[in-house]
Image (tube, rainbow, N blue to C red):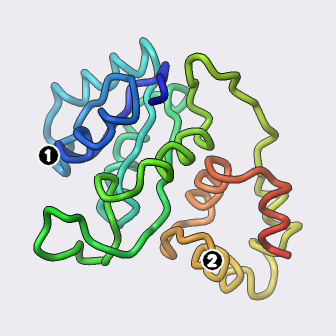
Amino acid sequence: MIKLKQAVIVEGRYDKIKLKNIIDAPIIETNGFRIFNDKQRQSLIRQIADKRGILIMTDSDGAGFVIRNFLKGTVDKSKIKNCYIPQLSGKEKRKVRGSAEGFLGVEGVPDEVIIEAVRKSGAEIIGEETVKRKEITKADLYSLGLTGTENSAQKRKQLLDKLNLPGYLSTNAMLTALNCLYSLEELKKIID
């Protein structure tokens, strides 16, 4: 079990149940899309973010990214860490059918994958030294041929597929995800 300074924001109750077994931190549910109209929950999340910071860990499907982006628009960005879980095909044991996109949600992802994603997110793990690394920049993406060059959109799509990240990520969203998951050196090795 890892202990975090930040509170963890998840989509639903089963995500919360899953994380309670591996993360020692407050875990707050958005109740899915209900967060859009729930002013009290939005206020609570903002207050928690101001006090201790938040780690957003939504599913890696389209709905998860909509919720993540909504939260990023309602909370001071300096108080947010993003944890991206990889897109893993499958369905949760409790469900009859998988998600529309065919990917596991937070509740279905193996513990070790979640722990690794948390470590790479930059969240402050209590009792472990957090290593601050140089962030990947847009200039780095340009020098790697991932933006502003011929076929850069195709190269980004290929990279996202290789990394099991959603293919619909914008360049900025991809940059955020890459900084949560990889160092510049790791990214260069992956591209080579």
**Residue 109 falls in which quadrant of the image?**
bottom left
- Which residue type does callout 2 highlight? Lys
Please, is residue 19 above or below residue 130 in the view?
Answer: below
Query: Where residue 90 sits: x, y (%)?
Result: 32, 74
Q: Residue at x 65, y 56 (%)?
A: 178
Give the alpha-carbon distance from disc 1 to disc 2, as whole Å: 33 Å
For the C terminus, the image quarter is bottom right
Marks 1 and 2: which is nearer the front?
A: 2
In the image, 33 versus 111, the foreground residue is 111
Label 1 Cα neighbours within 10 Å, binned few <14 / some 14-19 / many ≥20: few
In the image, 184 versus 170, the foreground residue is 184
Of the numbered discs 1 and 2, the one sitting upstream in the chain is 1
SS of the residue at dot 1? helix
- Which residue type does callout 1 highlight? Arg
Please, is residue 117 above or below residue 163 in the view?
Answer: above
Mark 1 highlights which residue? 34
Please, is residue 75 above or below residue 82 in the view?
Answer: above
The mark found on residue 162 in the picture is 2
